[in-house]
Amino acid sequence: MSDDDTAETAATSENLVELAKRRGYFFQSSGAYGGVGGFYTFGPQGAALKGNVEDAWRDRFAVAEGNMEIDAPTIMPEPVFEASGHLDGFDDMLVECPECGESHRADHVVEDETEYEDAEGLPIPEVEEVIAKYELVCPSCGAGLAGQAVETFNLMFETNIGPGDSDPGYLRPETAQGIFVEFPRLKEYARNQLPFGVTQIGRAYRNEISPRRSIIRTREFTQAELEYFIDPETDEPDLESVADVEVTLYPASEQNEEGGEEIETTIGAAVEDGTLDPWIAYYLGVAREWYAALGVDMDRFRYRQHLAGERSHYASDCWDAEAELDGNWIELAGFSDRGAYDLSKHDEYSDDRFTIFRQYDEPKTVERAVVDPDMSYLGPEFGGAAGDVVDELEDLAARDRSAFEGDSVEIDLEGETHEIPVEKTGFAVEEQTEAGEHIVPHVIEPSFGVDRLVYTVLHHAYREDEVDGEERTYLELEPEVAPTFVGVFPLQSDDALETEANEIVDDLRAAGLSVTYDDSGNIGRRYRRQDEVGTPFCVTVDFETIENEATTVTVRERDTTEQKRLPVEDLAETLAAIRAGDLSFDEL
RNA sequence: GCGCGGAUGGUCUAGUGGUAGGACCUGAGCCUUCCAAGCUCAUGGCCCGGGUUCAAAUCCCGGUCCGCGCACCA
């Protein structure tokens, strides 16, 4: 966004939140019942802005990239989250200090002070015992923690699917799992060809201990996520298209360094010198251009690499997009290399295959030890365990074919050793032709927080200036995201002016523009009203409009308050072109 | 969850142990030929629950919510 000579970027959280409440961007939910922490409602302006941001994201990350968009449920059954690792990860153990009142992660306290390495896996009573036995103390004040209750805190919202409580489900903590869990079907839609991408825009839920800073950290929020599935050995991103994009990077190495600094560079150069992984680099480049077009101030924007201890359980590398608000950096998006983690886990835990068949350039011939057991022998011999015996024989053949060299082969079954005549196993070494192999794709994940972006766009757009000696507050929103694109006013109370203005409203709406009509109070008040919600243009019908044959109206531009007279005839067309970015007000 | 500070019309705020006042906004009207002007009128409020008291929006206790710090953010 360009700096204006007169306008100040004067936003603070306080005056932005006040404006948001007063003008209908967002406000706390359920206020009539005292309010509830961490839940916000987007009002008429906010819902429109958010919708425009989502549309812009969809255009860029789904449509323009040729990716598929899906819409999965927000509730999924427990096994999904057992597989994803969230069920283990969400049970944080907290212990509170009796002296200073601070809460600490009980498992961390134990791990730091004892030889236990994975305290998170221990049952609660055992953790309490360990704390008592080792006489562990509060890391903050040193008071003894023995005897203090260890409590779990549940970061996923739990619910029951159907009547009773036999079938637990959870509200998804990220939209991503809705994509991963449907991978076997999605790969069919992609005709089993890598790479392909799947996007989803939707709600996610985390029962945060402490929601903060209005819509920055809530318990229900909207994510826009892309899961891009690649073959890590063969697929490469289109780096050329983003090589020249300038970015501010804050790599882990600089953060660890005393006096480490952010680096100004280009995507191409950062890949060249090894700072960025090519796939993450590609999306950092695309996203930086996209954020700039939406009105995020690029002087207050950077990409920061996660430190090793900061990464999620699934990520091998992660960069965050961050925006500065009130002197704090907040996370707008995360760009993770999730590797094969998610698909491998679902492959393991579910009945379906989460793999893609990669065909070799040339079919390979391999020698393979196989078994073809004689079931008429194994059946009577082992009864119901015969199936397990077969599995064991197959495993054994694959890992140690020498075991079959004698007259009989030994297998272990539930701790007991059994001898089976080799002739009954059907053991053979065969030559097989393999056309390819099943691989687990790797996942590159750009994950955007929509609510935080809406907040940032508003914050970075907030301006105060003076017009004719009067103070003015306005939002310098990009036309693409502004909730209302144009306001239409009759200059003053007058039937003829109002009739003409209403006709113009109809024309503009027919052209697909978001229009508001206002005939109350004097004209200046109406301009200011639209300025404050960020409406880019206002059209005013005056007496010149209705007195002349070639009817014209004034069109006022929000940021400069400059006005131009334009014919009514092609007003809709002209404004639609501006909205689409094909024309600018200066060119009129 | 802990600590500190808050909570008065839609918004911002004044206020006192005797049940509330302003400003802006909003609506109606007058005026008005382009930037929150002026005049008249109107709508609308003490976060919730207990306690003390003749009387609580005010004092006390508990809760909810907000802000900040700690912790948490998979």
Image (cartoon, rainbow, N blue to C red):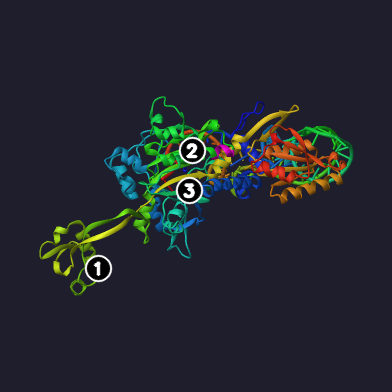
Determine the residue located farthest toward the top in the rendered image: A259
Q: Which residue is located at x 45 percent, y 29 percent?
A: A263
In the displayed structure, A318 sits above or below A171; it is: above
Q: Which residue is mark 3?
A: A226
Relative to residue A167, is residue B48 drawn left or right? Answer: right
Relative to residue A399, is residue A68 drawn left or right? Answer: right
In the rendered structure, does residue A15 fall within the stretch colored magenta? no
Give the position of the N terminus of chain A as an image quadrant: top right
Q: In which quarter of the view is residue A583 placed?
A: top right
* Residue contact at pointers 1 and 3, CB within 8 angstroms: no
Secondary structure of the residue carrying tag 2 is helix
The answer to whether tags 2 and 1 share a subunit is: yes
Host chain of mark 1: A
Examine the residues drawn in magenta and state their main secondary structure.
Answer: helix
The kind of residue tagged 3 is Leu
In the rendered structure, does residue A291 fall within the stretch colored magenta? yes
Host chain of mark 2: A
Q: Nearer the viewer, residue A196 or A475?
A: A196
What is the span of residues highlighted in magenta in the rendered image? Answer: A290-294
Give the position of the C terminus of chain A as an image quadrant: top right
Q: Which residue is mark 2?
A: A242
Q: Earlier in the sequence, mark 1 or mark 3?
A: 3
Do we see residue A249 in this rendering? yes
Secondary structure of the residue carrying tag 3 is strand
Q: Which residue is located at x 44 percent, y 27 percent?
A: A261
